[in-house]
Image (cartoon, grey):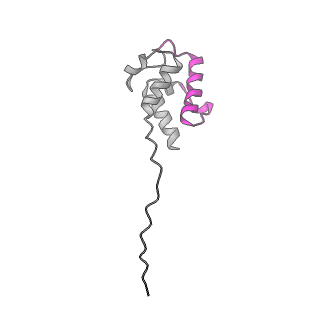
């Protein structure tokens, strides 16, 4: 009787993992885009003040920012999720988005 040698099955091919989203970079990009800062946001740090410090950030811009973040990060923001502290500094919306994404 002849023995048939079986080759082990190759491991399944998995698609490459999507790169981890850098929430800080993406929030800064959204701020720059929505507020038409023309690259000024690239120098922002987590501690950069927003609300009251950037003239472009008025109440209408806040609505646009929320909508853009919902689209960008695939999340839903309820009215009672947002208050003035959400846009106090650059780190505030970063933490907000990170918290929403974590569930």
* Residue 1 in picture, x, y percent from top left: 44, 88
Q: Position of residue 7 (x, y in %)?
A: 41, 70
Image: 23 above or below 102: above
Residue drawn at x 60%, y 17% as measured from the top left: 60
> Principal SS element in the magenta part?
helix
Viewer-proximal residue, 59 or 21?
A: 21
- In the displayed structure, would residue 16 be above or below residue 64? below
State the image quarter where residue 70 is shown: top right
| Residue extending farthest right | 79
Residue at 42% x, 19% y: name it.
Answer: 41
Q: Where is residue 23 in the image (x, y as percent from the top left)?
A: 45, 34
Q: As rendered, which of 26 and 6 lies closer to the eye?
A: 6
Front residue of 48 and 72: 72
Residue at screen point 47% across, 20% down = 32
Whether residue 64 is in magenta: the answer is yes
Total residue callouts: 0
Residue at 44%, 66% (x, y): give it: 9
Residue sticking out furthest to the top: 55
Span highlighted in magenta in the image: 54-83
Indicate yes or no whether the magenta region holds residue 78: yes
Where residue 93 appears, as percent x and y from the top left, is 48, 29
């Amino acid at each position: 009787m002849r023995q048939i040698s079986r080759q082990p099955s190759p491991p399944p091919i998995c698609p490459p993992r999507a790169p981890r989203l850098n929430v800080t970079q993406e929030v800064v990009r959204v701020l720059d885009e929505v507020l038409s800062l023309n690259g000024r946001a690239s120098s922002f740090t987590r501690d950069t003040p927003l609300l009251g410090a950037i003239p472009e950030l008025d109440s209408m811009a806040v609505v646009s920012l929320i909508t853009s973040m919902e689209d960008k990060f695939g999340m839903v923001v309820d009215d009672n999720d947002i208050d003035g502290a959400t846009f106090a500094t650059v780190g505030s919306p970063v933490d907000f988005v990170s918290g929403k994404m974590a569930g």
